[in-house]
């Protein structure tokens, strides 16, 4: 008797060609709904599930495959006499191949304005049941949940004859369970979020994180550390949706640095801006009248550190910017786009990884950090800066231009490792003090890097000044305006020093520690 294959797919990529080859391998095919219609329209012989089970689809198609003739054929253990007897007594054929992928739930909820009823109708019931049943019984049949598996399965049949190898069937079972787990996670996350919004609450009692491996990476932060890159969800987004135009494979450190660069450049949406990073900290950030001007200003902020850096741009790469980018060694460049002319220029530096990411502002809603025995979750630090809500605490008031410069410095300081100090002038960084064990040390590093350029410059601090020493050091170096969160028990000491020295000081009321 021919073997039996059950095909019921939402994603019909490669379906017809695959089904034709199954027929050549002497499979009978049963199918449901739209899959059966697609196969029949292609001239293939197919038995509808409702004809096979003798029971019609009901509830508007909600119930199709939930039937003993389907699940009995899937779950039967061919080496167990009682199971074989049950199949014979109830005239159930064993199913040798189950090909199922699920309703597009994640694609549906990604659409703007989707309603809860629309989302609920895309929750597959029969599909996950068949996948789980088939995966459970992998010793006796094969389950495929991804069109990318079709060719490998056909190759198995050619090599081993009537059925795929046990090793292949087990690997497919693992993928099926991962697929249903991801699917359930997406549904649970959506419903949790919807319910919390309805209750105007934000706290959840559970948090699930899962993903599918995009690629294995050569190593992690260091060569002795294994690493891999995973995509969350079935719809590619963020870096999984980026296009690599040229260059070597991305490394673990590249991806970590690129994400840090994306977060900084996402702060600037109007005028052309450029950010150059090393080890997740900015060594140069600038805004200009053109993209090439912004890049040149960012590069000149710290040309030494820019060597081998990561560059993020908020506008499409044009010819002048591409020419400037080729003048030094860079690891990666990312921008929303790249003109063909610019791409041709960049090709001269073929090892440089050049990526396009159209939506540079789309980041994760939460950040996750692993700790022993669990992990920490926090909302992303995506607060919108509103200078109109800042408090000018000194007698001297900022000019409109100074307020713009303070905002520029504050946006960058938010993305520097704490304790963070940033010195800027003319919308470009001059000095960055990052990751020091005390704020005084960061102030000294940033001012030393800025040197004589700190005359008339602005200074931003991610945390408050517990003493007035940093204010006095800044003033001695030529700083004329300071932005900080405020909140120290000794704020008045810093304010008094600023007034004494003729500085502008602004409190934001918001702290931006980055650990």
Image (cartoon, grey):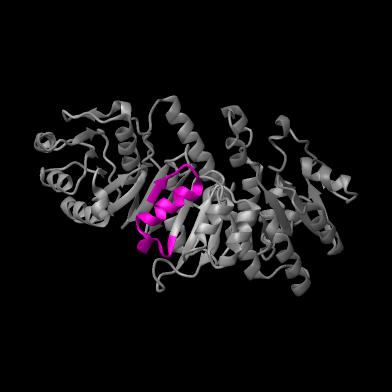
Image position of 58 with respect to 370: above or below: above
Principal secondary structure, stretch drawn in magenta: helix
Q: Nearer the viewer, residue 363 or 212?
A: 363
- Horizontal and vertical percent position of residue 243: 59, 54
Going by the image, does 177 lie left or right of 487? right
Q: Is residue 306 magenta?
A: yes
Residue 245 visible in the snapshot: yes
Relative placement, left or right, of 324 versus 456 is right
Relative to 218, 132 lies left or right:
right
Query: Does residue 359 sit above or below 195 in this rendering?
Result: below
Q: Nearer the viewer, residue 158 or 194?
A: 194
- Residue pictured at 36% horizontal, 41% vertical: 381
* Foreground of the two, 367 or 515: 515
Whole-percent x, y for residue 24 in the image: 86, 63
Residue drawn at 59 percent across, 41 percent down? 106
Q: Residue at x 10, y 43 (%)?
A: 468
Question: Which quarter of the figure has residue 50?
Answer: top right
Q: Is residue 215 magenta?
A: no
Where residue 84 appears, x then y in whole percent? Answer: 72, 59
179 left or right of 11? Answer: left
Q: State which quarter of the image contains the N terminus.
A: bottom right
> Which quadrant would residue 105 be assigned to in this image?
top right
Find the magenta span and give its range. Answer: 285-309
């Amino acid at each position: 008797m021919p073997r039996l294959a059950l095909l019921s797919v939402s994603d019909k990529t490669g379906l017809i060609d695959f089904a034709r080859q199954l027929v050549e391998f002497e499979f009978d095919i049963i199918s449901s709904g739209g899959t059966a219609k697609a196969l029949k329209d292609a001239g293939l012989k197919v038995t509808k599930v409702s004809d096979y089970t003798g029971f019609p689809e009901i509830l508007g198609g909600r119930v199709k495959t939930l039937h003993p003739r389907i699940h009995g054929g899937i779950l039967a253990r061919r080496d167990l006499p009682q199971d074989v007897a049950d199949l014979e007594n109830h005239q159930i054929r064993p199913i040798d191949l189950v090909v199922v992928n699920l309703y597009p739930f994640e694609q549906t909820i990604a659409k703007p304005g989707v309603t809860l009823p629309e989302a609920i109708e895309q929750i597959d019931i029969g599909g996950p049941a068949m996948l789980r049943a088939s995966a459970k019984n992998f010793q006796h049949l094969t389950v495929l949940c991804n069109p990318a598996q079709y060719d490998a399965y056909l190759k198995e049949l050619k090599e081993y004859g009537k059925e795929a190898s046990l090793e292949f069937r087990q690997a497919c079972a693992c993928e099926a369970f991962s697929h249903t787990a991801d699917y359930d996670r997406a549904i649970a996350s959506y419903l949790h979020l919807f319910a919390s919004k309805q209750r105007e609450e934000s706290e959840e009692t559970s948090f699930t994180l899962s993903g599918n491996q995009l690629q294995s990476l050569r190593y992690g932060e260091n060569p002795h550390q294994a690493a891999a890159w995973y995509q969350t969800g079935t719809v590619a987004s963020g870096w999984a949706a980026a296009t690599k135009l040229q260059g070597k494979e991305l490394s673990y450190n590249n991806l970590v640095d690129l994400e840090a660069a994306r977060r900084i450049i996402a702060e600037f949406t109007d005028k052309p801006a450029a950010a150059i990073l090393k080890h997740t900290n900015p060594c140069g950030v600038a805004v200009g009248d053109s993209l090439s001007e912004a890049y040149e200003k960012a590069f000149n902020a710290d040309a030494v550190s820019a060597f081998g850096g990561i560059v993020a741009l908020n506008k499409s790469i044009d010819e002048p910017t591409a020419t400037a980018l080729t003048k030094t060694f860079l690891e990666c460049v990312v921008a929303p786009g790249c003109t063909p002319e610019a791409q041709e220029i960049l090709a001269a530096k073929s090892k440089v990884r050049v990526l396009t990411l159209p939506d540079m502002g789309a980041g994760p809603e939460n950040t996750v950090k692993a700790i022993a025995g669990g992990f920490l979750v926090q909302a992303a630090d995506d607060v919108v800066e509103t200078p109109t809500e800042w408090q000018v605490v000194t007698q001297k008031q900022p000019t409109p231009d100074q307020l713009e410069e303070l905002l520029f410095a504050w946006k960058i300081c938010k993305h520097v490792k704490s304790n963070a100090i940033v010195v800027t002038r003319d919308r470009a960084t001059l000095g960055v003090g990052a990751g020091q064990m005390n704020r005084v040390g960061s102030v000294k590093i940033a001012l030393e890097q800025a040197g004589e350029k700190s005359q008339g410059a602005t200074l931003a601090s991610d945390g408050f000044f517990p003493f007035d020493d940093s204010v006095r050091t800044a003033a001695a170096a030529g700083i004329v305006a300071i932005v900080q969160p405020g909140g120290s028990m000794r704020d008045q000491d810093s304010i008094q020093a600023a007034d004494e020295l003729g500085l502008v000081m602004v409190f934001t009321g918001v702290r931006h520690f980055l650990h």
